[in-house]
Amino acid sequence: MATGGEEASPASERGKRRGADAELLLAAAVLGCVLVVGLLTVGNYSVTVDEFNADEYGRKSLAWYSSGFTDRSSFETVEDTLWYYGPWFHILIAWIQSLGLADHWTVRHATTFVTGLAGIALLLPIGRLALGRWAGLTAVTLCLTCGCLYGSLFFTPIDVPFLLAMSLAMLAMLAMVARPVPAWPATMGAGLATGLAIATRSSGVITQVYLLAAMGLCCLEVLAGPRAAARGDLLQIGARLGAALAIGWVTAILLWPWLQIGNPISQFVAGFLLFANHPNSFDMPFWGTRVVTTDLPWFYVPGQFLARLPEGFLLLLATGIASGFLAAWRFARASAPALMQHRATELQDVALSLARSRGYLLVWAAVVLPLSFIIVRHSTLYDSIRHVMFIIPMLALIAGAGFLRLLPVVCRFPATAAALGGGYLGFAIWLLAVLHPLEYIATNVVVGGVAGAYGRFDLDYWAVAARVALRRLESRLGYEHPDLFSKSPPSIMVCMSYREWGVEPLFGRPWRNETDPHNADFIIATERWHCADGVDDAVLIDKVERFGRPFAWVYSRTPLGQLGSPVTSWLHQWDR
């Protein structure tokens, strides 16, 4: 599959360096701008359902280590499913929060965002190593203009650090297999990175499967080379592979308390099997039909990607997939005569070509293997593409390979390509700005955009719109009745599934939190939980909309009792 080329001339090498410098400069500019924008807007994002328990898990896991492994609160007073995730990221956040640099939840969101952005930035070196120049920058750009990914970077507590760990593991593995007999520093790096992936989510163990396959291709290259060195090189490869796997498991055990309180292997298997087929069962919309999380159609993940990845992403991805299949077909057709006729020299060339394509094949494996596992195991999934978010960067790399295929055409029509590309990027940025801070609900024209996907897909499953609605209500009440909260704060219920009791971090004013909608002065209903239904005296006074579709509803209850007639009068005017 790999093809050899002629020795590059000094002029061509200088051209490559200039191209590489341009790619790096553009990547730095893009990432720098996104970092600034993200940090300036981080305060606009809501605390989401899983962040409450993840935040508690981080503090109590930090206590496990700081107490010398005697404080067991992380196993006794947090939700039990959290034990099956490694807490290193949440420990990091808890430590940064303890420094008092900013608001508690702003620190969490900023750290999560920077972590996710770092995972996406790693696509630049990954693309250069596995595919070639410009593939990495293309992948970075596609990820950052993908609303379902960019918006999730701020408040998805488990899957964002897993994205970073998986990207880091891919980069480390590519460095390790860059030559047939890996260097020891690269071996140690791959071991640490795969261990970090395992210690984030148990499914991170698949990185060691990738590593085994890639090292098998290293062995194939050695066997297809000079026979004199084969035996010694194979022994060295085996030693380095064993060391990387061992370092990975030691790292995972050190970072994951759940593996420390029993037999690490049996503890890991328990966590892995739980999330391979999680018992959490409920129904949700998918392409306009209701599906059950524990009985999903095999095409659930591909169908979600088809609906949620931006149009340009899908176009380049289709090109990358087509070019990959075409390359595989050509390789199979060229290899068939040598295999059938057992021609030794040609078989050697076939083996070398396959072995030297291991970087490219690793990227494909990082897409095909997890998707195949999910389909074969009939895994439980929900919340859109949240559980498979780590695959999006790898899809972006394949799309980057598709861009490289189109690059000769692009270079023939630079003005047209620049206009189309600029227009597309401008539209993508405009869409993210319009949706802010609900960027993660973005869908493409295949399903009619956000308006067309509304009701046909789970969109605001984190109830991010609730905070937008709450701030609007607080702003209007504060303007019309500045003394209201100082005299007798009204009560409010914010409808966040299983977290309605702990929504105080959302409050910008001293509300009284209420968990019964029949007793609340105000109710904020959300897409997943219409908790004002059945409250006969609830009056709709505001909606948070995107593209004409509501994602949060603000209700007041009448009569408003102690809130007094001025507020009642204003609410009636607002309702009209």
Image (cartoon, rainbow, N blue to C red):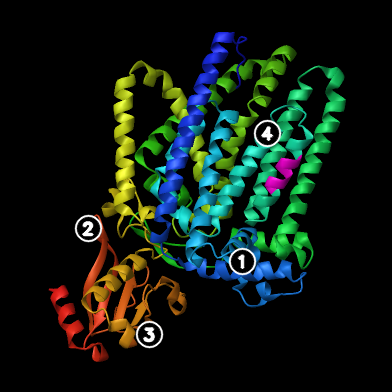
Mark in the foreground, 4 or 2: 4
Q: Is residue 20 above or below residue 121?
A: above
Horizontal arrangement in the rendering, residue 46 relative to residue 112 (left or right): left
The CA span between labels 3 and 4 is 56 Å
For marks 1 and 2, the one nearer the N-term is 1
Circle 2 is placed at which residue position? 548
Give the x, y percent position of residue 171. 63, 38
Circle 1 is placed at which residue position? 58
Q: Is residue 121 above or below residue 72?
A: above
Residue at 32%, 32% (x, y): give it: 422
Residue 516's label in the rendered image is: 3
Residue at 57%, 53% (x, y): give it: 161
Circle 4 is placed at which residue position? 175
Q: Amino acid at mark 4?
A: Ala
Secondary-structure class at tag 4: helix
Give the x, y percent position of residue 169. 64, 43
Horizontal arrangement in the rendering, residue 257 relative to residue 321 (left or right): right
For marks 1 and 4, the one nearer the N-term is 1
Q: Amino acid at mark 2?
A: Gly
Q: Are marks 1 and 4 in contact (CB under 8 Å)?
A: no
The CA span between labels 3 and 2 is 29 Å
Residue at 63%, 53% (x, y): give it: 203
Q: Residues within 10 Å of mark 4 (few under 14, many from 20)?
A: many
Secondary-structure class at tag 2: loop
